[in-house]
Amino acid sequence: VYDPTDATPHTNTTGASAEWRSSATQITSFYVRAGADYSTRDAFGTVTKLSSTSFNGGIGAEFRYPTTRFVIDALRSTAPSSSGVVVNRTEARLRIAHDFQPRFSGLIAARAIRTSGLASSGSVSDRKYATGTAGFEWRASRSVSIAGTYNYTWQKYQFTPTAAESNG
């Protein structure tokens, strides 16, 4: 539930999903998730009431080798955004972590997201968003480690002529 204290409409999403997981071997596991969500947005001022039922789900796999873990999945969900608009979110994720030594590991990850308003909302511009991460961790002991990451973020809105980028 998105319940702002300012003059924006209230939104609510409820739903149910089922998930099936399988570990085919000690190395591989898979999952499939499917469900439905019912989303509403209250009428407020010139904003009309909106309600929609949409499919949500995902599929993914994880591969665990002695020194490398590989995860890939694709997801779809419907939820209120931070601005109180109900959006569909389609997402793809990839993560690879590798132990170079018992105390030193590295990772790379990528994530791509596309958000779009529900078909009947009309007031939301589509957004494409991508992020990439590269990092390391060195463990001095069980409770002390030094980690470093580099993050790259890219974002583009449908009616904006340029994209935004961030490094950090």
Image (cartoon, grey):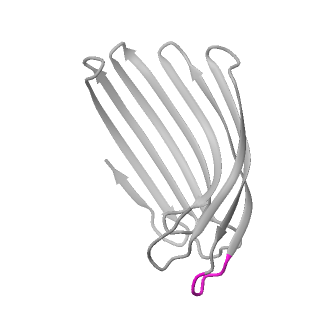
Is residue 48 located in the magenta-colored stretch of the structure?
yes
Numbered-mark total: 0
Q: Residue at x 31, y 47 (%)?
A: 168
Pick the residue in front: 16 or 30.
Answer: 16
Q: Residue at x 74, y 61 (%)?
A: 53
For the magenta stretch, what is the residue range?
44-49
For the question of whether residue 125 can be seen, the reply is no
Pick the residue in front: 73 or 132.
Answer: 73
Q: Judge whether 108 appears above or below 162 on screen.
A: above
Q: Residue at x 26, y 17 (%)?
A: 141
What main secondary structure does the magenta stretch of the protein show?
A: loop
Q: Judge whether 43 appears above or below 39 on screen.
A: below
Q: Which percent across, then down, holds residue 154?
A: 44, 54
Pick the residue in front: 36 or 148.
Answer: 36
Q: Which percent across, then down, holds residue 110?
A: 49, 41
Q: Judge whether 68 appears above or below 52 on screen.
A: above
